[in-house]
Image: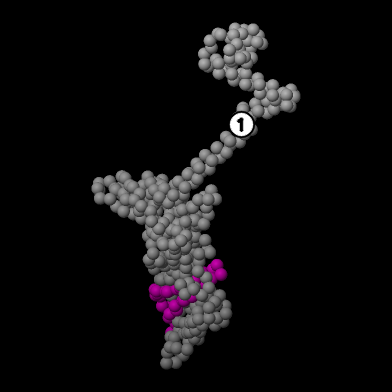
Amino acid sequence: MFCPECGEKNNDDSNFCHSCGAKLTIEVNEEKQQQINQSSNNNKVVEQTEAVYGVNEYYQIAKEENKTRKGFSTKQKVTLLIVAFLIIAIGAFWGIGRYISDPKRIAKSYFQSMSSNDWNKAYSYLDVKDSDFISKESFAKVASAEKSKVGDITNFSVIDTVNSKKSMDELTKSVEINYTVRNSSSPISKKINLVKQKEKKFLFFDSWKVEPENLVVSQYTVYVPKNTTLTIDNVKVNSKYIVKGNDTSSTSDTDTYKLTNIFYGKHELKINSLYTEDYSETVDIDESGSHSVHELKLKKQVEDDLVKQVGDVYKEFYKAALTGKSYDTVKDYFTSDEETQKEMQSSFEYLVSKGKGDFFEKIKDINFTNFKEDGTAEYSNSYIDMSLTAQYTYTSIVSGDDEKDSKTLETPGTTNLTVDLVLEGGKWKISRLVVF
């Protein structure tokens, strides 16, 4: 029995504590007695430890045991919190990454952007790169036209995603979407094809882009007269697109533009030059392949200047021939190619002979007046075909049976003249001139 006052152990049959003299017959409840017994046992452990290690060593051991009973230190708690946070963050990062890179989500976002006329956002999903003919602005124009054909989309849903090519790499996927349009209850099915990109999103996740199927023409050819500037949708077409070398589609009279990667649909085509009126038309670009522009109307001032130039050449050409001058005095009025020079020299020599009177009459002089363009001169494939009228009076000597019977005649008249001009070295030269 233990003393309820001092905790000292006594014999079970003792009535008083032999240590403090307290009466031992007082009843204590079971819980109190357990506390007393535990306290007594603790005191004995203390006494035994002090006896073995001494008082100082005992308190050191007690201190270490106390630390152990306190649980984790502050540093350990912080470390555990950081680890827990990292686990949660990695899980969230992985979940968000998989969501962002999901082909279904991309196809859905693209279709939603198209249906709500958000062209800039829709363009961001396309597997295209900005170029001379590929841009947000040009896409908006084409997409708006295509959307008007489809109608007002009222609802849609993503049906399924499948690999469009059976390959280990799964480089492409197709997403099927059903949608309805206003005033129609029948669903329409559309497949959106996606292409896996080489670059990863956030280093770990696949990146997908919408294939611009039926949106981009890989190549389109435009033929225009030389020395002109081609503009499409207010963008000047760079000369790098002009075919050079031995390409059979390129000629000496025409510039052949081979445009690469341009959106389907209607585009505004313009052609201008220093010599022609501005030309424009709407061209529907598709896989058919090409468009040609051959004839351009001359500017009024250019036409007037050329009519005067042609008139002056006619006067000089006839005058030089009828006065017996050399062809070299007029050859610079004509293009330098051998064929033209040969033809014009032959015409010149014919007039020289007329001036010498080798036939029934001798032309002494001719006076041209009032040159006019007969119709509208057009610039076609780098040359100008002009039809003119002119009034003239020529003086001739008609031979008789003998010299005293010869007569001098002045004959007025009007003639039609045909002239071709070509731009050579920055100057207009005549490539064909008809004499009479």
Residue 149 versus residue 407: which sits nearer the camera? 149
Question: Quadrant of residue 406 in the image?
Answer: bottom left
- Against 97, residue 291 (above or below) is below
Q: Is residue 36 magenta?
A: no
Which amino acid type corresponds to the residue marked 1 in the rendered image? Phe
In the image, residue 298 sits, relative to residue 341, either above or below, namely: above
Magenta range: 407-436
- Name the secondary structure under disc 1: loop
Residue on which disc 1 sits: 72
Residue 125 vertical position relative to residue 262 in the rendered view, above or below = above
Q: Position of residue 376 (x, y in %)?
A: 40, 65
From the viewer's side, name the closer residue of 164 and 149: 164
**Rendered residue at 72%/23% (across/down):** 50
Query: Which quadrant: the C terminus?
Result: bottom left
Residue 70: x and y in percent read: 62, 27
Rate crowding at label 1 as few (under 14), some (14 to 19) or many (20 or more) other CA atoms within 10 Å.
few
Classify residue 403 as left or right of residue 26.
left
* Residue 224 relative to residue 27: left or right: left
